[in-house]
Amino acid sequence: MSEPRTPVFAANWKMCHGPAETAAFLARFKQRHAPRDDATVVVFPPAISLPAFAAASAERPDIRFGVQDVHTDIEGAHTGAISAAMVPATGATWGLAGHSERRREFGDTDPMVAKKLQRLLDAGLRPVLCVGETLEEREAGRLSAVLETQVKACLEALDAEGRRRLVYAYEPVWAIGTGRTASPMDAAEAHALVREQLTGFEGCTPGRAVILYGGSVKPANIEQLLIAPGVDGVLVGGASLDPDSWAAICAAGA
Ligand code: PGA
């Protein structure tokens, strides 16, 4: 079982909101969302908008931000890629790795995701490991096996200190951007499976690991997801793009 903890509200903007939209979003969001010390708010804007995000949130350190992806290398001939080592200078403090869109569109494999987590850790960033099954995998009864493979590939590659800092996001692929949300029971079941994988790894404390749920989270379903056993917060795509909707989500559980 997990212990109750302060929720994490994470927003994944994907390839939306350039610098100007980022500034406009924050102007509105800052009015709609007062700092909460009983929750963590973190936004993952596109990398090109990180400086705009830093500037527009300068007086609101409670609104943390991070990078959506980094390269497996620190530097070199990788046109278009971003090194984790470059990220802290922007003020960003978190990083995603293994999002299903990266796995599907860019071919990110488990060993690559593990490497990216290590790069994020080396840069002093808080890494979020995204895992989740496709509909086909779920229907074939492979939920547990998929989560085990994705989680263990990363835990085996990290040391105890790295594992200690890891945050997890369970995002069933069939629920991402589809409007189809996992039921609170589905989420609770999958989060328990993720938690189970942590047992026996030095540095992991299954009951204290922070596991977010992602996939069509919106103001209308946030409260019930947040009370599902083992759900420690959410990773939100579409419904985080509008400042009012995002503020409504970040008000949950208060
Ligand atoms: P969604 O995306 O909320 O639009 O389903 C979630 C995610 O991909 O992180």
Image: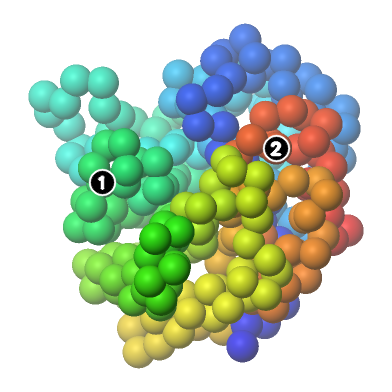
Res 212 quadrant in image:
bottom right
Mark 2 surroundings: few (<14), some (14-19) or many (≥20) residues within 10 A: many
Residue under numbered circle 2: 239
Residue type of the residue flagged with mark 2: Ala
Instruction: Please state the horizontal and vertical placement of residue 103, each as a whole percent of the image.
Output: 31, 46
Res 79 quadrant in image:
top left
Q: Is residue 23 left or right of residue 46?
A: right
Q: Quadrant of the C terminus?
A: bottom right
Label 1 within 8 A of ligand 1 by Cβ: no
Q: Residue at x 83, y 31 (%)?
A: 244
Q: Residue at x 75, y 64 (%)?
A: 226
Instruction: Please state the horizontal and vertical placement of residue 246, each as a whole percent of the image.
Output: 76, 38
Q: Is residue 44 left or right of residue 157?
A: right
Mark 2 or mark 1: which comes first in sequence? 1
Q: Can residue 92 be seen here?
A: no
Instruction: Please state the horizontal and vertical placement of residue 146, each as a whole percent of the image.
Output: 35, 69
Residue under numbered circle 1: 108
